[in-house]
Image: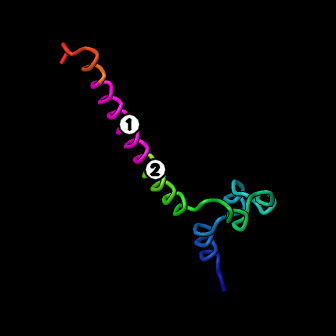
Amino acid sequence: MLDDKDIARLKEILATKDDLKGFATKDDLKDMAAKSDLKSLASKDDLNKMEKRLGRKFTQLFNFIDKEVMDDRKRINSLERILNPSVS
């Protein structure tokens, strides 16, 4: 049987109604998303995979732009040499 000393010790360990007043109740949570509602959202793994794919795509895009700019620069230099042979 529990005596007053045991009850006092339990009150130190266990939460009282007053301790729990700041927490949400079932009614507070009824309009919140359930775990099953979140299945259609992306997972961390999905986001990591997408980030890697996008990183590769951006790298490819920047490499393409860099190559095109360099090719254009070479063409411009060639045209400048043709049009201004004294400037070399």
What residue would you read off at disc 1? 68
Determine the image quadrant of residue 15.
Answer: bottom right
Q: Nearer the viewer, mark 1 or mark 2?
A: 1
Q: Quadrant of the C terminus?
A: top left
Residue beneath the point at 54% across and 61% down:
46
From what the image shows, is residue 73 above or below residue 33?
Answer: above
* Location of residue 26 in the rendering, given as x and y in whole percent from the top left corner: 78, 63
Q: Quadrant of the N terminus?
A: bottom right
Q: In the figure, is residue 9 to the left or right of 17?
A: left
* Of residues 39 and 19, the one drawn nearer to the viewer in this rendering: 39
Q: Earlier in the sequence, mark 1 or mark 2?
A: 2
What residue would you read off at disc 2? 57
* Of residues 77 and 7, the one drawn nearer to the viewer in this rendering: 77
Q: In the figure, is residue 85 to the left or right of 69?
A: left
Residue beneath the point at 75% across and 57% down:
32
Magenta span contains residue 67: yes
Determine the image quadrant of residue 87.
Answer: top left
Find numbered disc 2 in the image and state the secondary structure of the residue it sits on: helix
Residue beneath the point at 60% across and 77% down:
6
Magenta-tinted stretch: 59-78
Give how far apart the Cα atoms at labels 1 and 2 are: 16 Å
Q: Residues within 10 Å of mark 1 (few under 14, many from 20)?
A: few
The tag on residue 29 is none
From what the image shows, is residue 12 above or below residue 66?
Answer: below
* Location of residue 67 in the rendering, given as x and y in whole percent from the top left corner: 35, 39
Magenta span contains residue 66: yes
From what the image shows, is residue 61 above or below residue 5?
Answer: above
Find numbered disc 1 in the image and state the secondary structure of the residue it sits on: helix
